[in-house]
Image (tube, coloured by chain):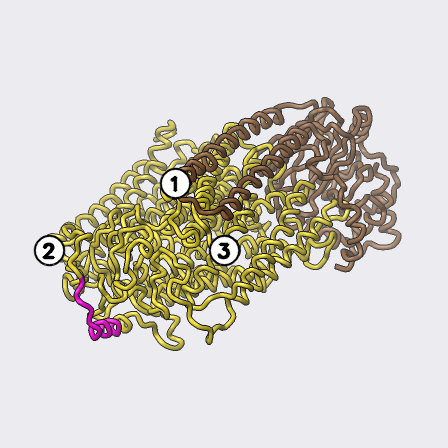
Chain colours: A brown, B yellow
Amino acid sequence: MRRGTLLIIPALLAGCDGRHNWLASAGAEAQRVEELFWVLLLGAAVIWGLVIGAAVYAHRRQVDPSLETQARRFILWGGAVFPTVIVGALLVWGLVILRDITADEGDLTVRVDGERWWWRVIYETPEGDVVTANEIRLPVDRTALFRLTADDVIHSFWVPALGGKMDMIPGRETTLALTPIQTGNWGGLCAEYCGGAHALMRFDAIVMEQDAFDTWLAAQAAPAQIAGDDRGFEIFQEEGCGACHTIRGTDAQGPVGPDLTHLAAREKLGAGIYDMTPETMARWITDTHEMKPDIDMPPYPDLQGDRLDRLVAFLMSLD
Amino acid sequence: MTDEIDLSRLPPPEPYDEARDTAQRKRLMEAWREPPGWKIVTAVNNSYIGKWYLLTSFGFFVFAGILALMIRAQLAVPGNDLFSQQLYNQLFTLHGTAMMFLFAVPIFEAVAIIILPEILGARDLPFPRLSAFGFWCFVIGGIFVCGSIFFGVAPDGGWFMYTPLSSDPAYSGLGTDIWLLGLSFIEVSSIAAAVELIVGVLKSRPPGMRLNLMPLYCWYVLVVAGMILFAFPPLIAGDLLLEMERAFGWAFFDPDRGGDPLLWQHLFWIFGHPEVYIIFLPSIALIATMLPTFAGRPMVGHSWIVLSAVGVAFLSFGLWVHHMFTTGLPEISLSFFSAASEAVAVPTGIQIFCFIATMLVSKVRPSVPMLFAGGALAIFVFGGLTGVMVALVPFDWQAHDSYFIVAHLHYTLIGGMLFPLFAGIHYWYPFVTQKNLNARAGKWSFWLMFGGFNVAFLPMHWTGIMGMPRRVWTYDLSDGWAVLNMVSTIGAFVFAAGFAVLALNVLWPRGKAPLVKRNLWNAGTMEWAAEVPDKPWGVRSIPYIHTRYPLWEQEGLVDQIDRGEWFLPDAEEGKRELIVTDILDARPLFVQRVGGPSFLTLGAAFCLGAVFILATFHLWAITLIFGAGFIGFTLWWLWTGTSLIPEKPEKYAGRGLTLPTYAQGNRSPGWWAVFITMTGDMTAFMGLVFSYFFYWTALPDFLPSSAHLPGFGWLMLGLALLIGAWAMTTAARETLGHGQRGLAMVLLIGALPMGALGIGAWCWSAYSKGLDPTVQSFDAMVWMLILWMGLHLLLNWVMHLYVAARVKFGHCTPEYRADLMNLTLFSHFLALTAVTIFALLALFPLLMGVGP
């Protein structure tokens, strides 16, 4: 609580940060829903006003039993015909939008696999798969088709600013098309409760210009550049990190945890929850379960001093 | 006889005689008196059970409400560390679970148990001991589920327990088992109450109250109890599959073994969506009952409302998939379920407009109940409108699982259920206690709750639009959700303060306050005919009803009732008696004697509770002992309390009406109870059939090759034997009817080995082909169906032995053989189940070309 109490004042000022806002107009699909939303909101306000107004009027006016026939007509028109017309029209409009925002293919294909509680991200390129984690970069004005899977429990892939969400279900593959139209760093979240650290299963969705994206993807495709005698890498291997994590271009080929080949190139640590700094990295290694409770990665509290510094320095060099 | 009696031309009542009146009242009092002191726990009368049910449900409401306040405290500020992730996950799971299963549904049953018999002018519901049994099951199960949080093992999988999070023991612990078994237990009590209420509405109406004269409240009860009957069983089937996977590793939801996690979502929401209307309609029923009172005139559009309620009930079973719009379903399914979801707006709209129309043609007296009803309307209409939004697939893709949904569902449930309920509390409090609530405190509680609610939940829509997903225990300042959450938290605490005022008002001791006058609201429905102070028998004599609002439209009715001028004004034999009428026209059929106070129901509930609780901890041996105890108590209860041969075949009920004192077959409530229970049972079975076909459509290679199918010949043989057993039971009914007691007993006992061989052949058909339920979903499904049959057969055997013993000891005779008729009815359903299973396991693969 103490941490929170101090933060309440800046919180009041920071109320309008739009990283996860559906109404940020950052994606073509989100924009379609946004149009729908404003119409729905306006319509709902009008209808609510009419119904409540009718109730108040009915309550206030003087009794006139001759109104009974009119009252029945009122039920028919207000209770049956009017809602039928309105929801019928909305239904058609909704289905038209649905057809528009779904797609079978995109300009690029990204496979995302939901894990407890992080995201395995695989870009499909002509040269082969490019593996990364917890950060998705997309070129602006291109439709990305996400192929979504999970192999432990159900998760749901959601970048509110870009568009709707889609569940990731073990044993199935679902797809979602997103077309970003604004560059920026948009927030991504797991929307389906997946146990334990569900709240801390985040990612960054960074929308870039095509050129910058191409450069980034090429860099991601390359193996890590590590000096042969990097002491940090030796510690990494001695501590057994490579059993779970992969660093392409080295012996570390563990398939369990996130791929660390270009770890330091990501903006966030721990699946979109901490800034990528040497300090958070060090704490992540020693106080893992304070940083993110329940996760599979064991903490390394005994790793201290120089050994920790070197390991952190090594990890921060993976860009 | 009854069929010839013209109720509208009954002979005049006997002249009033004070001495006779006093004597009759004394005898009635004797028959309906409740046990003194601590023995009151053995009471079964609806006014006691109903009150306890109500208070217990509100106890769970307060518990779940405190959990909600803890949730709000945690979310008040970003980065809060007030509660741990682990505890928070338990908090919201238990909040939803307790509100849904331990408050919203039970409170409907509680209110119905209190007022339904009185609205019907009946002395009690047809199965008072069943109500008591259901109540005690509810208490035990509820405490078990809620108590888990004090040991840190509360369920933490979210209230809809999605698989594989809940099915794989690697991801979820004991809490999930507590949830599954504890709630299955409570579902049993919900279904018991549903059976009771359906039979109550259909068979316990006063003479003359044809279906079209039935008060709106009763219509809603009938509709909702029917919905419970069809909605809860699929969840029980799902619970069974899930617990079999958790406890024994059967392959139902694990995709690696041919299972499918989405099956659970279907089974859950086939229950879960009707559940919303199961919660909502009873509260609308309260408004539909109160509004005419305050308007001083009958409801405009009575039939419209009835049809709309039925329409909502039907539609509600066809839109469960709108909870699954983001699971990657094909566009055609999305369109269909989106349309069905939107369609529900129409019957709901009609009901609301009927209320407004009634207000339009009358002068509504202002009152605290109407204040709450007005608040309900304002909130619910808003929730309905956001419901129209989220029923649109593209919008739902954004809103789903965000705080927008949290806001929406609280608007519909609190507006649609809680506020009408509070209105009802203010309206019926004088009926239950003969004292009045403080109106000033009532207004205070209303405005605090109405204001607090909107402050808490209106901003939540925006929190959702700002992208906050539900069920997160913490968030970061940079997410931009801090201010909105703080506002919501403040609102939640104001709401809680409002509820505290209401609770104080209700619980305030009013020992010395004056009694209210009789029918203080000047209502038209029968429950207000009750005397002040009230009497345990309900109505002094059971009247002939020929109007919808008898207290308005039947002049002098209350006096006639009081003077004992109507039916059953006396309890000559010292028995608790009700009049059972026929379903359509409410012609009196017979006088039913119902059970009085008993410890047997308590014992049965306790043992059954122990079975579910011990099974959670896999303590199988003690579980079996308590299982035997449950069967023992139940048989004792049935033996001493049901289908008793009356001391005389008929009795005089007053006003020239002589009625039989025994009924069997479809004239008896017991037969209807079996029929309705078995309909629910078949619905659960249909949940399994649905699962079978779901696998078949979802998984291309669900059906194995013919070498791996259960043996056709053995299945055939098994079916023949099972049908043979059924034929023997049916033949027993006929032979007993012809007076051949010995032969009937032989047939009853003979049906046991016949059935045993049948189920044995089925087990062999699967076992001999090496079907292993832990390996493949098909195998698990086959064994599940056989297990289902086997469990029912076991129950059927107990019933056969019971009925054979009844015949042997002369309690079931050629003239009085209700027990055997009920057993036969049960067996018909079993035969249908057997044929269906055979069709699934033997014929369907054949049809698909993979047969022998």
Q: Which residue is mark 1?
A: B304
- Vertical side of B156 occupied by B780: above or below: above
Q: Main secondary structure of the magenta part?
A: helix
Label 3: how many residues lie within 10 Å, few (<14), some (14-19) or many (20+)? few
> Is disc 2 placed on a helix, strand or loop?
loop
Q: Secondary structure at mark 3?
A: loop
Secondary structure type for disc 1: helix
The CA distance from mark 1 to mark 2 is 51 Å
Whether A137 is drawn above or below B228: the answer is above
Instruction: Tell me the residue at 18%/56% (across/down).
Output: B817
**Nearest-to-viewer mark from 3 and 1:** 3
Whether tag 1 and tag 2 are in contact, CB under 8 A, the answer is no
| Marked residue nearer the N-terminal end (1 or 2) | 1
Subunit that carries the residue with mark 1: B
Between discs 3 and 1, the one toward the N terminus:
1
The verdict on a common chain for dots 1 and 2 is yes
Residue found at x 29% / y 42% = B832
Q: Is residue A114 left or right of residue B290?
A: right
**Label 2 Cα neighbours within 10 Å, binned few <14 / some 14-19 / many ≥20:** few
Residue B424 or residue B619, whichever sits in front: B424
Q: Which mark is residue B596?
A: none
- Mark 3–mark 1 Cα distance, whole angstroms, equals 26 Å
Region of the chain picked out in magenta, as a range: B13-27
Q: Which residue is mark 3?
A: B366
Name the chain letter of the residue that bears numbered label 2: B
Badge 1 amino acid = Trp
Task: Check residue B167 for magenta coloring.
Answer: no
